[in-house]
């Protein structure tokens, strides 16, 4: 399976490197075909890694990870175009955070909306799965960094897409507890967790933490 990483930041690098290590062909996409950060990642990641524009990466891949800043995610996907995205699975790990007024950033979406829903509305033939947006990038790809039981969540309208992502999370990344929250509207809940996550990060002084849901 060919996988695209949209975005060249820490999250994209962590996910891309893990996926290459698992044996996948991975293309990192950015606004330009010769992005310096993407080129550095390709040199480090090895023969299965490549780079290109957002459109090139999307056309190359069967599965995509949206690792762009939430504020530009919709713009990025529009630059790719509907035809290159049709029928593909997009794992949306971005969050709708606005830091224009300082730190910590705040959510810019309304309570009855989410970034995941916005992407799904804009591209109805794209199979959006919200996941991995409630933790830092090191924990995303190495859940054993946090001892004990803890959870990752998936949201999406397409059951087959969620099953594919869940298999990658468990068999590839090593997650033991995946909670399917339901359709894409449930992304409102995981995105709304970010203001608390940011305050926990500041209080704990580390991003190596996660949450676990227990029930009777």
Image (cartoon, rainbow, N blue to C red):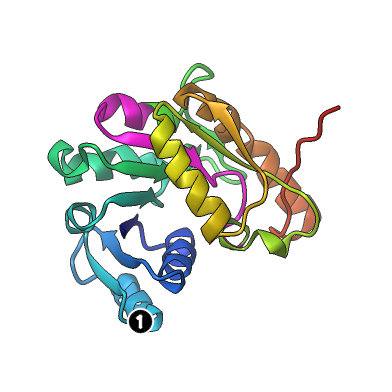
Q: Is residue 94 left or right of residue 78?
A: right
Whether residue 134 appears in magenta in the rendering, the answer is yes
Q: How busy is the neighbourhood of tag 1: few (under 14 within 10 Å), some, or many (20 plus)?
A: few
Image-quadrant location for residue 28: bottom left
Above or below, comparing residue 90 to residue 175 in the picture: above
Q: Is residue 82 left or right of residue 97?
A: left
Extreme residue toward the right, this view: 216
Residue 113 placed where, x, y %? 46, 21
- Tell me how many marks there are: 1
Q: Observer-nearest residue: 19 or 16? A: 19
Q: Observer-nearest residue: 88 or 27? A: 88
Q: Quadrant of the C terminus?
A: top right
Above or below, comparing residue 168 to residue 18 in the picture: above
Residue displayed at 25% across by 42% down = 77
Q: Which residue is mark 1?
A: 46
Q: Which residues are magenta?
A: 118-138
Residue 108 placed where, x, y %? 48, 30
Q: Quadrant of the N terminus?
A: bottom left
Residue 4 placed where, x, y %? 31, 57
Residue displayed at 72% across by 49% down = 210
Q: Is residue 93 visible?
A: no
């Amino acid at each position: 399976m060919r996988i695209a990483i949209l975005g060249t930041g820490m999250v994209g690098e962590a996910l891309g490197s893990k996926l290459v290590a698992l044996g996948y062909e991975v293309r990192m996409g950015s606004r330009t075909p010769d992005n310096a950060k993407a080129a550095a990642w390709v040199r480090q990641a090895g023969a299965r890694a490549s780079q290109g524009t957002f459109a090139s990466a999307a056309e190359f891949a069967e599965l995509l990870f949206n690792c762009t800043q939430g504020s530009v995610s919709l713009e990025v996907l529009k630059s790719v175009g509907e035809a290159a995205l049709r029928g593909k699975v997009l794992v949306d790990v971005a969050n709708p955070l606005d830091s224009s007024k300082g730190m910590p950033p705040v959510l810019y979406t309304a309570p009855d909306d989410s970034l995941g829903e916005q992407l799904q509305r804009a591209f109805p033939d794209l199979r959006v799965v919200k996941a991995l947006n409630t933790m830092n990038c090191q924990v995303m790809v190495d859940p054993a960094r946090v001892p004990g039981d803890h959870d990752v969540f998936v949201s999406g309208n397409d059951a087959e897409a969620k099953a594919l992502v869940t298999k990658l999370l468990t068999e590839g990344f090593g997650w033991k507890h995946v909670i399917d929250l339901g359709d894409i509207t449930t992304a409102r809940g995981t995105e709304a967790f970010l203001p608390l996550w940011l305050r926990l990060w500041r209080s704990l002084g580390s991003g190596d933490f996660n949450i676990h849901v227990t029930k009777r």
